[in-house]
Amino acid sequence: MLRRSPAAGKPFFLVGSDYVFPRTSHAITKQQLQVLGGSVAGESYLPLGEVWNISPLVSLIKKAMPDGGAIINHLNGDQNIVFFNRLRDMGVTPENGYHVMSYTILEDEIDQIGAELLQGHYVASNYLMSVPTAESRRFIKAFKARYGDERVVTDPQESAYNMVYLWKAAAEKANSFEPVAVRKALVGVSFAAPQGKVKVMPNHHLAQTVRIGKISRSGQVKIVEVSPDVVEPHAWNQYERHTKGQACDWTDPAKGGRYRF
């Protein structure tokens, strides 16, 4: 994807709200880019909820990447509304060679931010409404019938739905409702989810499909990249030297949490 993207060969700038998830995600991103031959032109964080300093941030991005590049975005909430407005106002747009990849924007936020501001930018998710599975179509139909036809289905909602059925499968496998028995039975349990098959791995995270979508002016998200198979989860980052060589396996109590392999 890095070599096929519109920003191929251009630098990256990392932006996020200032808390643990964006900082951890960006630490992983920087290590992966280094391995793949990419470069990071800058990195900046804003206190959660603050918007007054977004214009200086966009100026910093333009200065660091005058010829365009990729912006990895982990801003949250109202910060995204102001951020994408400033990007447009200051010419940091796809037409000028700037492409934003957002990991924290859900499909129901597109209308709030403005589809005209997000057009041509990207989101990454396990589930998008345009996933072409029969399970997704049934899920969307049932969701809209229950909550209203105008409602947009999002990745966290699909994930919550999946969790109920994974718990059900584990309880049936354990033939028990006892938490300890269900937890032991979880590993290996799978479910034909709206996004495709999901499976609980020994580290208690899910193997899932990863998708990248491109936002259109109408607000629809077109899937442009799909992982060839489910991506197995790694509880510990194998690019970061502090956690490389570590894993998690709850089928062995001695290896739960973390162990060195």
Image (cartoon, rainbow, N blue to C red):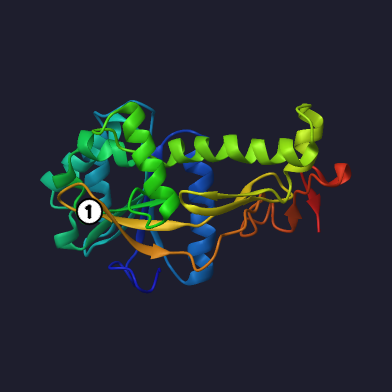
User: Where does the image place residue 59, in percent across and percent down from the top left?
Assistant: 21, 46
User: Where does the image place residue 124, in percent across and percent down from the top left?
Assistant: 40, 52
Figure quadrant of the C terminus: bottom right
Seen at 22% across and 53% down, the residue is: 62
User: Where does the image place residue 42, in percent across and percent down from the top left?
Assistant: 37, 53
Q: Are there few (<14), some (14-19), or many (20+) residues within 10 Å of tag 1?
A: some
Relative side of 121 to 240, left or right: left
* Count of numbered circles on the image: 1
- Look at the numbered disc 1 and give the secondary structure of its residue: helix
Q: Can residue 44 be seen by looking at this rendering?
A: no
From the viewer's side, name the closer residue of 257 and 85: 257
Relative side of 232 to 213, left or right: right
Relative side of 159 to 46, left or right: right
Question: Type of residue at label 1?
Answer: Lys
From the viewer's side, name the closer residue of 56 and 94: 94
| Residue bearing the label numbered 1 | 62
Seen at 43% across and 68% down, the residue is: 38
Relative side of 202 to 2, left or right: right
Q: Quadrant of residue 99?
A: bottom left
Seen at 15% across and 51% down, the residue is: 217
Figure quadrant of the N terminus: bottom left
Q: Quadrant of residue 75?
A: top left
User: Where does the image place residue 200, in percent across and percent down from the top left?
Assistant: 66, 48
Seen at 28% across and 68% down, the residue is: 6
Q: Can residue 108 be seen by looking at this rendering?
A: yes
